Image (tube, rainbow, N blue to C red):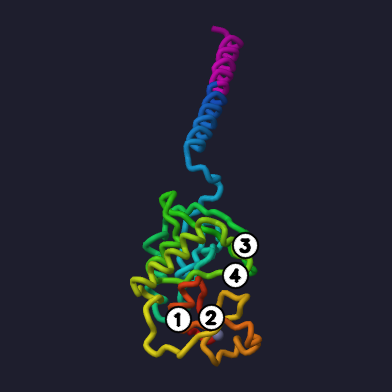
Amino acid sequence: MTARARRTGRSRSTRLWRTGLVVGIIVLLVGFRLVEQIGPERHPDDRFTVVRVIDGDTVELLGGDRLRLLGVDTPERDEPLFDEARQFLVELALGRSLELEFAGSRRDRYGRLLALAYVDDSVLVNKVIIENGLGYLYLFRDSPTDHPAFAAMMQAQRAALDRSLGVMAPVAEPEPYYVASQSSFRFHRPGCRSADTYTPDRWRRFGSREEALREGLSPCRNCRP
Ligand SMILES: [Zn+2]
């Protein structure tokens, strides 16, 4: 074989190899596409892995974003059940892939993602926390309360009250009554400074903490009723 013939042979095999590589890449891409389409109906880009649990309602996602679970408020660091609520979320979500569903604003004023989060495609983390008495339903006037998840979280709060679980258990020294503004989802102790600005005829009055919680209100962060 001449040197020229050897060169031609080599370049033909290089061409074949390249063609094979391109075909291989196309097959892989089509394959991935099919696998992606078999997945859940929500967009696959809205799946995130939890790398750190900060507290009972906030996690850090792979890539550095923080996620604040929508519609739920768990105990602060200096409050009872903080550790339990955090640990509960560790067991439920740490190292796992969450599927996020955005309802309303995608981020809060601190830049955190704000979403409903599902594990195993169907377990609504936000609801399970409330159901176990480790957080309160947390509504604002612009909360998307017509979303079915919010009705489910309301039910969860009532179920936790029925079972006196965690933060839903009766308190040792209840106030004679509690107050809330007609237009707010927070309730207060009678002497709370945050409630001072309320016009008295616009007050709602509740005979007990439980009564306010049953209506989907959550405790004021100042007077912590
Ligand atoms: Zn208050």
Alpha-carbon span between mark 4 and mark 2: 13 Å
Dot label at residue 187: 2
Counting every numbered tag in the picture gives 4
> Between residues 145 and 43, which one lies in front from this camera angle?
145
Tag 3–tag 1 contact (CB < 8 Å): no
Q: Main secondary structure of the magenta part?
A: helix
Spot occupied by residue 28 in the image (x, y as percentages of width and height): 51, 31
Q: Is residue 107 left or right of residue 166?
A: right
Give the residue at x 56% y 81%: 204
Dot label at residue 140: 4
Dot label at residue 107: 3
Give the residue at x 51% y 79%: 219
Q: Is mark 2 within 8 Å of ligand 1?
A: yes
Magenta segment: does it hold 3?
yes
Dot label at residue 209: 1
Alpha-carbon span between mark 3 and mark 1: 31 Å
| Residue at the extreme bottom of the image, as rendered | 191
Pick whichever of labels 3 and 2 is earlier in the sequence. 3
Tag 1–tag 2 contact (CB < 8 Å): yes
Of labels 3 and 1, the one closer to you = 1
